Amino acid sequence: MIRGICFCVPNGCPKLFEKILHDIDIIKYTWENIENDNQVYRLNKNNDFLFTKPFYTGYEFKKLISSNNYYSIFVHLHAYFTNELQKIDSYYDFLNSKCQMIILLTDSIFVEVYCKDVTIIQTLKQNAKKNSFKDIRYITDKNDTRDKFCAI
């Protein structure tokens, strides 16, 4: 069974999450920022954190990732249809939760997206190819070695 997709992105890729999530209706989700697992900096004179709140509406999230220049080192985001946020440590927790998607970025270049909707996974794959991301492969029951969801 396909759990998600993973790929490598260029270090410092501008507007990375806008590119990854292009053609996905991100507005319909509530986005949870797992704060201890995120290091995303605005490229401004203060290098402020991009994600400063625990969660964002879809509109807020879309505006944030599309209208700012930022540099991403570590990211851990959860997408829900509702505000019923839950603690998710493992793939089993994810399957049994209302969370629809988990995005992990490690060391600025390694991206993993777990998603319950296979059509979204296909769109993520198309976006990765269109942006010339490398090492694109599905995460499956057989090849997934991750036992905990964390980016750091």
Image (tube, helix red, strand yellow):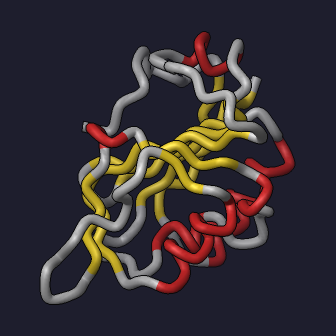
Task: Give 136 or 93, whichever is nearer the viewer.
Answer: 93
Q: Is residue 123 above or below residue 29?
A: below
**Left-right relation of 43 to 8:** left
Picture quadrant of residue 71: bottom left
**Left-right relation of 43 to 18:** left
Picture quadrant of residue 61: bottom right
Picture quadrant of residue 130: bottom right
Tell me what residue is drawn at x 52 percent, y 45 percent: 103
Q: Is residue 35 above or below residue 27?
A: above
Residue 4 horizontal/vertical position (percent): 65, 38
Note whether residue 138 is visible. Answer: no
In the current view of this chain or complex, which residue is farthest to the right?
119
Residue 108 horizontal/vertical position (percent): 28, 59
Tell me what residue is drawn at x 50 percent, y 73 percent: 64
State which quarter of the image contains the C terminus. Answer: top left
Tell me what residue is drawn at x 42 percent, y 15 percent: 147
Residue 111 horizontal/vertical position (percent): 45, 51
